[in-house]
Amino acid sequence: MIPYKDDNPTAIVPFVTISIVAANIFVFIVQIMSGSDGRAIVYAFGAIPSNIVTFKSQQPIHPILTIFSSMFMHGGLFHLGGNMLYLWIFGNNIEDKLGHTKFLIFYVVCGIIAALSHTITAPHSDIPMIGASGAVSGILGAYILLFPLAKVHTLIFLGFFVQVIRIPALIVIGFWAIIQIVNGLMSTGMLNKGGVAWFAHVGGFVAGLAVIKVWVWRKHK
């Protein structure tokens, strides 16, 4: 099930969303050009849980700063493409709802909480975490709360056949959230062996739900 657009128009030009997408693409190009599959730059600027916990590292920047730098790095083209697709589909509506400045703050806060969520579940890991997934997960959390019935155009694969159907965001994002939670629970005990930082996704999603609810509640009040 792959979403590719929604029927939820915006009243503004989402230039912050566009800028974030552009920044991620630029950093990915830098990673590729750095050589060695970008491994050195990933270990230099990725968020390494053990370093964040101890504040000690051989990285060129402080471990806390790697939480921010890691948000713009990706492990491959599909990793980048998937994150940017979800950001593009759902981010513009959250930016429209919050405004440009608040949306940027919201995005960063969700990314921070996501990184800390992974760090808490794998405090001794020396494997760098990279990707915009945590921050994007926060956007999904906000979207499912604000626009649960918005229709999302989704590709459904039925064997050799591909069907395009319009599904409520509640189902599309809800299905995604269940996958993250299940995989996160299944990965418990294997967090030091690399792979997907599932709890970063879960943490970012919960952060998005909580932060957007507080902001919307304060605005209505």
Image (cartoon, rainbow, N blue to C red):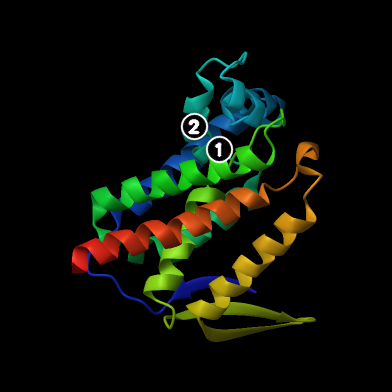
Residue 180: quadrant of the picture: bottom right
> Quadrant location of the C terminus?
bottom left
Tag 1 secondary structure: loop
Image coordinates for residue 40, horizontal then vertical, percent:
66, 22
Residue 88 appears anywhere in the view: no
Q: Which mark is residue 191?
A: none
Residue at x 71%, y 25% (from the top left corner): 36
To which residue does mark 1 refer?
Answer: 73
The kind of residue tagged 2 is: Ser
Q: Give the secondary structure at mark 2.
A: helix
**Mark 2 neighbour density, 10 Å: few (under 14) some (14–19) many (20 or more):** many
Front residue of 16 and 61 = 61
Q: Amino acid at mark 1?
A: Met
The one nearer the camera, 158 or 131, is 131
Q: Mark 2–mark 1 contact, CB under 8 Å?
A: yes
Query: Dot 2 corresponds to which residue?
Result: 69
Residue 57 rendering spot, x and y as whole percentages: 61, 16
From this viewpoint, which residue is outermost toward the front?
221
Q: Is residue 195 left or right of residue 56?
A: right
Q: CA distance from mark 2 to mark 1?
A: 7 Å
User: Which quadrant of the view contains residue 76?
Assistant: top right
Residue 64 in sight in this render: yes
Residue 98 in the figure: left or right of residue 166? left
Residue occupying image coordinates x 80% and y 81%? 159
User: Is residue 135 placed above or below 8 in the rendered structure?
Assistant: above
- In the image, 55 versus 151, the foreground residue is 55
Give coordinates of residue 133: x percent, y percent: 56, 50
Residue 70 lies, in percent from the top left, at 54, 35
Residue 10 against residue 123 in the figure, above or below = below
Q: Is residue 12 above or below residue 164?
A: above
